[in-house]
Image (cartoon, rainbow, N blue to C red):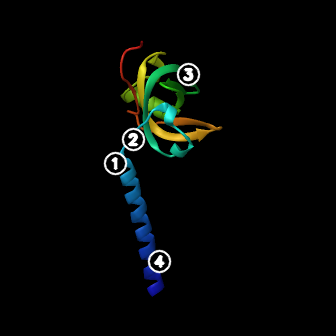
Amino acid sequence: MEDQKLAVACVFLALAGTALLVFIAREAGPVRVEIGSLGEGDVGRLVEVGGALASVSEREGNFFLRVCSDKCVKVVVFKKLAQEMKENSIDLSLLRNGQPVAATGMVEEYMGELEIVPFDRNSIEVTGAAA
């Protein structure tokens, strides 16, 4: 009986600890970084980058933005989020090369390259007019 109580307490504490970590991570917010400073150590980190839009492409509803400042990074917006953005904040198909943008998302590595994957409909923002 004592072992069962101990097991239940351990499970409860593990779940509470996990919930606390998720809460802290969300409340901490993104860290503003220069694109050129992104490295493998940033994988899994929530960041915000800014720069000029070098290209926008769409495949099967997924959008691929190339944002450049001192260097360039790919920002990948998957179909479901792109649709949610279009309905609530920004139509990615209307973005044009040269527009200054800010992108917030998780740094991920795909096929050896770092990319930023937004997860919120307000994660892409046009910060000014095209140059």
Where residue 27 is drawn, which disc sits there? 1
Q: Which mark is residue 7?
A: 4
Residue most toward the left? 27
Instruction: Say whether disc 2 or disc 4 marks the residue closer to the N-terminus.
Output: 4
* Left or right: 89, with 41 as reference point: left
Q: CA distance from mark 3 to mark 4?
A: 51 Å
Which of the two discs, 4 and 1, labels the residue nearer the N terminus?
A: 4
Tell me which label, 3 or 1, sits earlier in the chain: 1
Q: Amino acid at mark 2?
A: Pro
Q: Are marks 3 and 1 in contact (CB under 8 Å)?
A: no
In the foreground, 79 or 48: 48
Depth check, mark 2 against mark 3: the one in front is: 2
Query: Which secondary structure lies at badge 2?
Result: loop
| Residue 57 at x, y percent in the picture | 56, 21
Q: Is residue 123 above or below residue 95?
A: below
Q: Which residue is mark 3?
A: 57
| Residue found 35% across the figure and 47% down from its top | 28
> In front: 30, or 84?
30
Label 2, residues with CA under 10 Å away: few <14, some 14-19, many ≥20:
some
Of the residues under marks 3 and 4, which one precedes in the sequence?
4
